[in-house]
Image: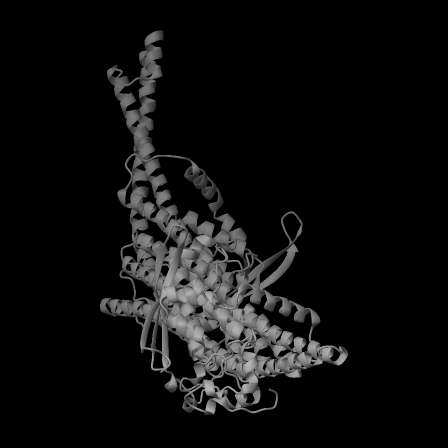
Amino acid sequence: MSGSVVDNTVSSGNSSAAIPTDVSGQILDLDEDDDLEVFSKDTTLTDGSSFNASMQTSPASMINQYKFEEDADTKDIFVTVDNPESHVTAIETYITYRVMTKTTRSEFDSSEFEVRRRYQDFLWLKGRLEEAHPTLIVHPLPEKFVVKGMVERFNEDFIETRRRALHRFLNKIAEHPIFSSSEDFKIFLTAASGELTSHKKQGPGFLSRMGDTVKAVAAAVRGVRNRPQEFTEMQEYVEAFSQKIISLDKVTQRIVREQKEYLEELKECGPTYALWSQSEEELAEPLKNVAGCVDRCCKETEEQVKNLSDHLIPVLHEYVLCADTLKAVLRRRDNIQADFEAKTEALATKKANRDTMRDDLDKAEDRLEWANNALKSDWTRWQKVMRTDLRSAFVDTAERNVSYYEKCLAVWESFLHSQRTDAEGNGKVDFS
Amino acid sequence: KQDASPPPRVPCKPMPTKNNLLDSRQTKEKRSFCMVEKGTSLLKKMEISVAEAEKRTGKNAVNMQETYTVYLIETRPVDAASEGTNPVPDSLWRRYSEFELLRNYLLVTYPFLVVPPLPEKRAEFVWHKLSADNMDPDFVERRRVGLENFLLRVASHPDLSSDKIFYSFLTEENGWKETVFETGFQAKADSRLKALNATFRVKNPDKRFAEMKHYGDELQSVISQLLRVRARAADRLYGVYKVHGNYGRVFSEWSAIEKEMGDGLQSAGHHMDAYAASVDDILEEEEHYADQLKEYLFYADALRAVCRKHELTQYELEMAAQDLTSKKQQREELATGTIRTFSLKGVTSKLFGQETPEQREAKLKMLETQIEEGEELVKERNAECEEFVKSAWVDIERFKEQKDHDLREALISYAIMQISMCKKGIQVWNNAKECFSKM
């Protein structure tokens, strides 16, 4: 397979005819690249051929076709997650979310879909994508449980935060050049509950998964010998990024805490001014006015706190999880390389079964090249997405802060205005 | 005693002072900390200020080394300043305890006036970053301003401003203390204090004064509560701003590992630092507002004192009247031989026999004298009471107007502070937003 350039996707229409004969052996291979899909963002080349699960081209050609698509105008699929509903059965209570899809893609049977999915289903999808593409970066899902305890699972705020995160997750998948054409993704978006359940059961069986795990552990134990510099740099970056994003998450949570405590104290100020106004005559009006102003500022502060919690913190948190994802991806890549290195060694040292070993080695080499290129491209993509996400999250936060201060400013200016008109009316004080 | 009609209120222009940290703020603010009636003859003559504060060490009454602070009182004739010649002002140094002595003298000498309060002796209602240490330079500075305010308040009072002891406090460095003690006010103070501390009940309380006293209680209670709540809120606000400084640090560290995002992050970080730092100024200004509230917290106490002293005056009148009535009754009984009221004397005389006509005559004569004296006393006390009520009520009205004006100004300046804080916040976050969008 190495070296031969087979431009499969150029041939349109009948996909099965495009499979090169020397790849056919690999279709039966139950390795991780089972449903490794080739997908080109060059839309002229995608007419159904991209959904053939076992098509594969050489890594070299794949690089040419793996273009990073940023143009929102060509977005042809829109996914929303909303409408959480609670379901009670004899054994459990769980929440489902409505997943709506609107698309113009021809591979979809219709242009609109509406299904209900639960958290487990999202987990399944994520698992499938990771299995299929071990060195691509899958956006993280919100965590299973709230740290504080199960009781909070059905709390309104928690459900809303989770819903938003699930929405972001699906959209990230939809925007990803490779994931968005995954068969599992399509099924997730379109299948009725029964269909989904039976499709889930079709995945690589338990034993095969066990086999994968054993291999992964073995590879990890072996360790990588000659990791290319760029991946080492990536790892260093991920370590540092992870630390920074965790710090930002902590700092932001601390800010929220401090603001909540400030709010608690501030809430007592208004009533105190109001109480005072009750013993006064001339001063009663300005005091009541000030009490009102303080109360209004309290409301704004409360909203501001909610904004931080609802918008900035979840995004930061997602990128904390991303850092972990990146670490896992780098590890998997290392394992693939370790496997290749081990097989290389084996071929060099062992005498028996040289032909099978050479075959294995070839496959391992391909897998490695594939993995490296996939990771490199997706890494660039991920950085752009990260930059966009965090930039807009911080810009949003800054805007909300400005808006908060503007509202409070208006409150106090209205007080000043009321005092001015009052005073000038009574001819009391010169305000010049 | 005072001007016929209250002269128009003019915000006073603070004098240029050297150590005044709040100086720029005071000149900036159109509304000044104190309201000065330029109408008093004292202020027409001289400008008064507490210009500086200094630490001194010396031996105290028990011959131990102590460190204390002295304050420089400067006085300058009004004409000279307006002529533009700006001569060196007369000045003298005074300690806080001397201010206290002055105030005590005024309290005793003018019990019917709401005497302006001194700034607090010890820092109270502090939020944690503010020092409660009396020697702390910020505390000393705020006290200096408070003492100046006290002097200006007294100097602008229609009655107090013409007091001689006050005048010599401002102008005679040496021997002032002796002069004060020579007035013998201390003895009067002690006896008054004793009487006031005793529990007594007035039979017919004056409704107006009772209401005033009640108002004083409420004012004190609510301002205390407000100061407490405000201090706690200030503490929390400090925390919120300061934590944002961490953003600055982390952004800076993060920018080091990023290529394209680096610059935006770095500059945003600087704005976060600026934001965190801005809270210090904000809270210093709020301290100024707290001081304005505190002045009226202590004024509430002065108001209650006047009401309490009125009560005492009335009580003494009632006692004298009661005494007179009982003496008159005794005379009547003795004269007519009827015992209407129960008295031990009456019982014993019944038991042990009547007294002789001579005895009775002597007694009657004594009673007559006592009754005469008693009537004089009642007249005196009545006059005292009436005088007290008249003067006190005028001053209370004056005080009410002053309080309404000052506190309204304080609320306005509080609003101005909040607006300034909001404007700073808007600026910082807009700047940060620009930097973030360059990420």
**Image quarter of the C terminus of chain A:** bottom left
Task: Where is residue A117? Give x, y as percent.
Answer: 38, 65
Asked which quadrant contains residue A212, the reply is bottom right
Q: B117 or A405: which is nearer to us?
A: A405
With B344 as the anchor, is A145 left or right in this view? right
Instruction: Tell me, yes or no, if residue B433 can be seen here.
Output: yes
Q: B384 or A414: which is nearer to us?
A: A414
Task: Where is residue B255? Give x, y as percent.
Answer: 57, 79
Q: A158 or B368: which is nearer to us?
A: A158
With A330 as the anchor, is B281 left or right in this view? left
Image point (61%, 90%), residue name: A3
Image: A302 above or below A61: above
Asked which quadrant contains residue B196, the reply is top left
With B145 as the anchor, is B404 left or right in this view? left
Image: A23 above or below A285: below
**Image quarter of the N terminus of chain A:** bottom right
Image point (45%, 58%), residue name: A261
Image point (51%, 70%), residue name: B276
